[in-house]
Amino acid sequence: YATLFVLVITLTYGAAYIAGERRSGVLRRLVTSPFSRGVIVGGKILGRFVVSALQVSGLVGVAAVARIWTNVDLGGNLLGVWGVLLIYSACVAPLGVALGALLIDRDRAANIGVLMTMAMAAFGGCWWPLEIVSGSLRTFALAFPTTWVMRALHGLISFGHDWKAISPSLFVLVLFGLAFTTLAIRSLRVE
């Protein structure tokens, strides 16, 4: 669920927020500041990341407390789960900025964000294990960052893997993050 919630915050609210700033002229006014376009875009990405990171930290904190009173098992490495979710938050935060940059209408950006969130969650294995779907669908799922974060989380929680074992999935998440950041920088026009 944390994987899904990160997408909701970054894509739905993030895209709507950026689209609203474009429409209201806030981004146009930022151009008059002494900051470069890269710094402005970086700040927008950082803002989306901070909101998502706070959400993830709250969820993991609640899980840590709930773990005391219930039999909910998140594996022996709750700190590792938190770290993976923070990396994932940094990965998808630029995607929300890019989506908001491409759409001027705040409502449309939020609606498309919801659709993208649901599609990425479904295809990425957030709702059911990818082991039960066809081979071609598992291959298609590799195109989504949700697949890679779920692999990392599954490794930590279900199999007790360490960071070395899940590092290939984390590396792919970093590559997604770099690609989404490039897309955000190229998409967000603040002229």
Image (cartoon, rainbow, N blue to C red):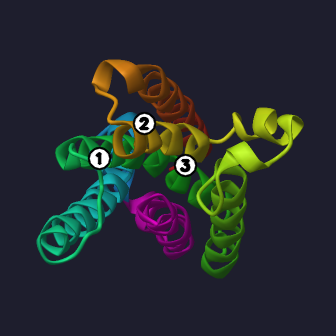
Residue on which disc 1 sits: 81
- Relative to 188, residue 116 above or below: below
Q: Nearer the viewer, residue 125 or 117?
A: 125
Q: CA distance from mark 2 to mark 3?
A: 25 Å
Type of secondary structure dominating the magenta stretch: helix
Q: Residue at x 40, y 37 (%)?
A: 159
- The percent position of residue 124, horizontal first and vertical second, equals 65, 49
- Magenta stretch in the rendered image: 1-29
Q: Residue at x 66, y 75 (%)?
A: 105
- The percent position of residue 136, horizontal first and vertical second, equals 88, 35
Kind of residue sitting beneath label 2: Gly
- The percent position of residue 59, horizontal first and vertical second, equals 27, 68
Residue depth check, mark 1 versus mark 3: number of the one nearer the observer = 1
Number of numbered discs on residues: 3
Indicate the secondary structure of the residue bearing disc 3: helix
Residue on which disc 3 sits: 95
| Crowd band around label 1 with a 10 angstrom C-alpha radius: few (<14), some (14–19), many (20+) | many
Q: Nearer the viewer, residue 12 or 182?
A: 12
Q: Which mark is residue 16?
A: none
